[in-house]
Amino acid sequence: MMKKSVLAALLLTAVTAVCLADDRPIEAGMLPEAARTFIAAHFKGQEVAFAKRESEGYIHVEYDVFLTDGTKIVFGKEGEWKEIKNRTGSLPEPVIPKPISDYVKEHHPEARITGLERKRTGYEVKLSIHLEITFDRDFLVIEYDD
C-alpha cells in the first residue's frame, strides 16, 4: 500500500510540474523593466524580433530575446542577463566585463567575443576562433575548450 501512495505522489508531482511549464511568445513590452533597459542601453538601433517567456512552475522563469541583428539574450526572472550570443558579429564592449575583454585582447587579439554566459561560478566566453574560455568569479582563467 505504501508503494502505491509513494507512486501516486510522484505521479502527481510530475503531472503538476508539466502542467505548470509554460513556454509562450510575448511582446517586447512584457519583458521585465531591467531587460528592456539593458537592451535599450547596449543594443541601440536593434529591435526585438521575437521574445519568449519560459517557465517551469512559479520559480524558474527565463526570457529568450532575439534581436534583429541575430543577437540572442537570455534574461532571468528579474530581467538580469544570463547569456548573450551573436554568432555573426561581436558583443557590445560595455556588456563584457573589463577583465575578460582585456584578457581576450591580450591573448587572442584576432578573436571576437561572440558569446558570454554568466554562471554562479563565473563566466563562460565564446570566441570567434572556436575557443571557449571559462573564468571564475575573480576573472581568473580556469579552463580552455575548443
Image (cartoon, rainbow, N blue to C red):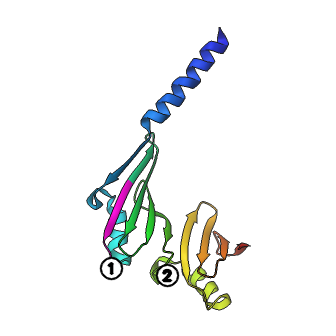
Pick the residue in front: 19 or 9: 19
Residue 59 vs 83, above or below: the answer is above
Residue 101: give its label: none
Q: Quadrant of the C terminus?
A: bottom right
**Chain-order first, disc 2 or disc 1:** 1
Q: Say few, some or many: other residues with alpha carbon within 10 Å of mark 1 (under 14 / 14 to 19 / 20 or more).
A: few
Q: Main secondary structure of the magenta part?
A: strand
Q: Is residue 76 left or right of residue 101?
A: left
Residue 49 in which image quadrant: bottom left
Amino acid at pointer 1: Lys
What residue did someone put label 2 on? 90
Q: Where's residue 54, x and y in %?
A: 42, 49
Q: Where's residue 92, x and y in %?
A: 45, 81
State the residue at coordinates (29%, 61%): 28
> Do the residues under discs 2 and 1 have CB atoms within 8 angstroms?
no
Q: Say few, some or many: other residues with alpha carbon within 10 Å of mark 2 (under 14 / 14 to 19 / 20 or more).
A: some
Q: Where's residue 80, x and y in %?
A: 44, 62
Amino acid at pointer 2: Ser
State the residue at coordinates (42%, 73%): 70
State the residue at coordinates (31%, 54%): 26
What residue did someone put label 1 on? 44
Distance of label 2 from label 1 (alpha carbons): 14 Å
Instruction: Name the element at disc 1.
Output: loop
- Is 47 within the magenta? yes
Residue 39 in which image quadrant: bottom left
**Bounds of the magenta span?**
46-52
State the residue at coordinates (54%, 77%): 114
Q: Where's residue 42, x and y in %?
A: 38, 77
In front: label 2 or label 1: 2
Residue 21 vs 97, above or below: the answer is above
